[in-house]
Image: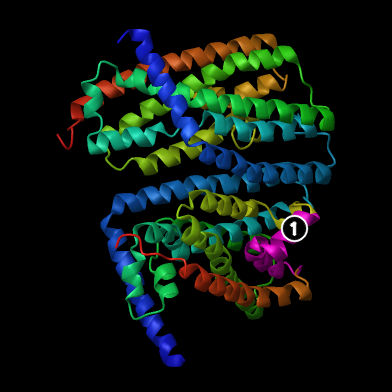
Amino acid sequence: MLKTLKKYALIYKVFVKNCFIAQMEYRINFLFANTIEIAYLFIKLLYVMVAFRVGVVINGYTPDMMMMFVGSFTMMTGFYCLFFYSNFMNLSNHVRNGTLDLLITKPVSLQFIATLRNVDFGFSFTNVVAGAGMIIIAWSRMDIPVTPSRVLVFMLFIFLGIVLKYAIFLMPSLISFWTVQTAAVNQMSTAIWDMNHVPMHIYGSSVRHVGTFLFPVFVITNFPPLFVLDRLTWAHMVWFLIAPLLFLFLSRKLWNVAIRNYSSASS
Amino acid sequence: MRLHSMYLKTFSLGVQNSLEYRTNFFLNLFGAIFPILIQFFYWRAVFTSSGQQIVFGFSYNQMIAYSVLAVLMSKLIGTTFQYEIARDIKDGGLNKYLVKPIGYLSYRIFCFLGEKSVQMLVVLALSVIIMLLLNAWLDFPVNLPYILLFLCVVPSALMLNFFIYYSLSAVAFWFTEANGAFRTFALLANIAGGGLFPLDIYGPVTKAILLALPFNYVIYFPIRLLSGTLTGPEIAAGAMMQLVWIGVFAALSTLLWRQGLTKYIAVGG
C-alpha cells in the first residue's frame, strides 16, 4: 500500500515538472490565462465591494466575513484549475478521438492518469494567491486568534474541499462516455459552482440544502471559513469528513461504469 | 448576383447558423438561470438586512428587474465572431473572402444580424414574459411606450457591440494568439456596461468614467430606459450617443482593418 502510494507520488511529481516546463515555454499563453483570471477575480471582488458599500450585516455576515467567503471561493477555484479542470475538459476529447487507448496501455491506474495528468499553472496562479490574500486580510481584520489548531483544521478542511471538488465535478465530465460532447454539461456545472460567489446563507433554505447534501458545492467553499468563524455545527463537521469519501466512492463507481462504454474511436 | 440578394443570402446564412446550433443556444440561455439566482438571493438578502427601501438609488423590485434583464441582455448582445475572425486571420481563411465580390465587413454584419434576429425574438419574448411576471409579482411598471422605445434602441446596442468587437478582432493581425485578450476584454466590457451590477453601485468618480465609456450604451442604457427611470431628454441623449459611438467604432475598425491587412500574410496560400 505504502509502496504504491510512493510510486504514484513519484509519478505525480514528474507530471508536475513536465507540465511546468511545457507551460513556461508558452509564456504569452501563461500571461493571457492570468489576465482572464484577473478579470474573473474582478467580478468576485465586486460582490465583496457591494457588501462593503452597503455596509450592513447581510444575513448575519459582516462585509469582512463576506470577504473571507469570497476568498475561500477564489482559492478553491484556483486549486480546481490547478489540479483538475484541464483534465476534466480533456476527457471528452480523449473519448471522441480515441486517445484514451494510449493511456489504457500505461502501467498505472487509468483514472489516475486520465484525470490528474495535467497541472495548469496559468489559470490558477492568480486565484490561489488572491484567494489566500483575501482570507488572510479578512482573518486579521476580524481579530480572529491565530491558534495552531485553528490553522491546521482550516488547512485540513481546504484539503478535504479539494478532494470533494474532484469527486463531485468528475461525475458530470464522465457523461462524455455516453454523449461524447460535454460542452453544455461543463458549462452548467461551472455555472452551479459559481453560485459560491456569495455565502450559502444568502440562499433560501431549499437551495442551501441541495447545495449542502445532494450536490455539495457549498460545502467546499463555505465550511472552511464557517469553521474559522466558529459557526460550523458538529453535524456539519461530521458531514464534511464523510462527504469526500462518499463522493469519491460514488465517482469511482461511476468511472467504472462509464469506462465500459468506451469504444475506441479511431481504430 | 444582385447586391441586395447577396446580403439577403448572407443574412439567411446567419439565420440558418443560429437554427442549426439551437440546442447550444437554449442551453446557454438555460445557464443564465444560475447568475439570475445568485443576483436574486443576494439582493433579497441585502434589502432585507439593510432595512432600507432604496439601495444605490434602486428599489427592491427595480434592482431585481435590472439584474434579470441585464443577464438576458448580455446574452442577447454577446458576440462570438471575433474568435472566428481571429481563426480566419491566423489560418489564412480570410483569403477566400478577399476574392469574393462581398466585403468581409458586410459579410460579417449580415451574418451577425441574421444570427441575432432569431435569438432576439426568443430573448425578447422571454423578456416580455419575465416583465409580466415581475409586474404581477413585484409591481414592476410595464409601459408600452417604454417597451417600444426599448425596441428602438436594442438594434443600435447590437450594432454598437458589433463594431466594438469588429474593431477588437483586428488585434488578431498583430497577435496570432488573441483569444485570451478577447475573453478578458469581453469580461471587463460586460462589467463596465452594467451586465453584472448596475453602474450605480460604484462611487461617483468610477460611475462618471464608466458612463463616459461606450459600453454602458449596450446594456445599462437600454435597461434603464425599459425600467422607466430615464427622462425624455436623457433618452434622446443616450440614443444619440449610441449613434456617435457606432460612428466612432465603425471608423476605428476601418482604420485598424486597413492597417491590419497590410500585415496579413495569407497562410496556406
**For the point 60% across and 44% down, which residue is it?**
B31
Q: Secondary structure at mark 1?
A: helix
Residue A60 seen in the current view: no
Residue B20 located within the stretch drawn in magenta: no
**For the point 69% across and 45% down, which residue is it?**
B37
Among the 4 quarters of the image, the one containing residue B204: top right
Range of residues picked out in magenta: A205-231
Q: Which residue is mark 1?
A: A208
Image-based side of A212 in relation to B189, left or right: right
Q: Looking at this rendering, what residue extends furthest in the left direction? A: B269
Image-based side of A5 in relation to B231, left or right: left
Viewer-proximal residue, A76 or B25?
Answer: B25
**For the point 16% across and 37% down, which residue is it?**
B268
Could you tell me the amino acid type at mark 1?
Answer: Arg
Q: Position of residue B243 (x, y in %)?
A: 49, 13
Q: The disc numbered 1 marks a residue on which chain?
A: A
Q: Position of residue B87 (x, y in %)?
A: 30, 37
Tag count: 1
Residue B107 drawn above or below residue A93: above
State the predominant SS element of the stretch in magenta: helix
Q: Position of residue B149 (x, y in %)?
A: 65, 13
